[in-house]
Amino acid sequence: MNTNPDTYEDIAETTQLLVIPFLAGIAGILSVWGKQTGYRVTLHRTMCRHDKVYLQQTVNYIASSKEAERGSGRIFPVDRGIIGAAFHSQKMHHTAQFASDEALVAALGEDMRDSGDERSIDDVAYSYLAIPFLGRPDSVTPSRDNDKLVPLAVLYAECYKENIFSDSALLQLLSAQCNQFSEQLDRIEEATLSHIRNFSYPIYDKSLELSGDSPYVKLNSIPDLDYTPPVFKNLKSINFQFYEGAA
């Protein structure tokens, strides 16, 4: 397990328990749509440390193999890969459609060489997806425009089936799942629960100006403008914890 304090921080178990059922639903859809090819899904939340904003993996990957079930608590800069691209653009990003397996493998191989990825191409997923969840966080900057939406989380998914995220029917289904998840977390945020509280992270304007791009520039598409990201109406962060005080 990665316990480097610069790249890792514990995630409250309460937060994990809220996220895992949602990701299990996403994984179930991919297991059917991907026709039993390999997949991994997780959710990264926006968090703040030392006056800067990062993306943090909330739970271990929900994956088709137990060997891939890891990663909870890892911290990434907001310009990391496809999740950074989704964070920066505030739009869904996914792998482009390729006319043939050969064209996809050629593009992936070139991207891997360009990014210095030394893994075997057989060990790398063919399809990637990132969907940002937007909201209005608490701010420590008095001049901040409180109506400005910023990413509070990013869903990440990968699959070994080619062109899976070019399927509009699948994207509609996953988008609906994300919208339902955001609505349910909003309801939990509104509810007065005896021993569960969501503690907000302040978000700093200057940290949201970082750019994001995917390392696999030939493999991944431009932002998908056909899908509106889910928006939290009440939620200001994803940081649910057990609370011993009075309700």
Image (tube, grey):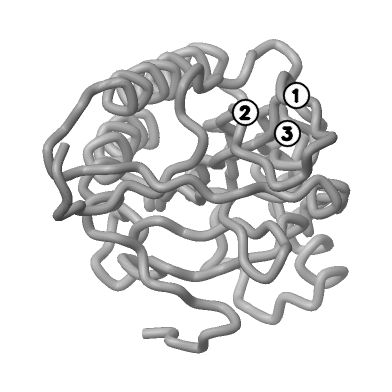
Do the residues under discs 3 and 1 have CB atoms within 8 angstroms? Answer: no
Q: Earlier in the sequence, mark 2 or mark 3?
A: 3
> Callout 2: few (<14), some (14-19), or many (20+) C-alpha neighbours within 10 Å?
many
Residue type, numbered disc 3: Ala
Q: Which of the numbered marks, if any, corresponds to residue 136?
A: 2
Q: Which of the numbered marks, if any, corresponds to residue 148?
A: 1
Cα distance, mark 3 to mark 1?
30 Å
Cα distance, mark 2 to mark 3?
30 Å
| Front one among 156 and 28 | 156
> In the picture provided, is 29 more to the left or to the right than 4?
left
Q: Nearer the viewer, mark 2 or mark 3?
A: 2
Q: Name the residue rendered at 56%, 63% in the picture.
A: 124
Query: Which residue is the site of mark 3?
Result: 96
> In the picture provided, is 36 more to the left or to the right than 155?
left
> Callout 1: few (<14), some (14-19), or many (20+) C-alpha neighbours within 10 Å?
few
Q: Earlier in the sequence, mark 3 or mark 1?
A: 3
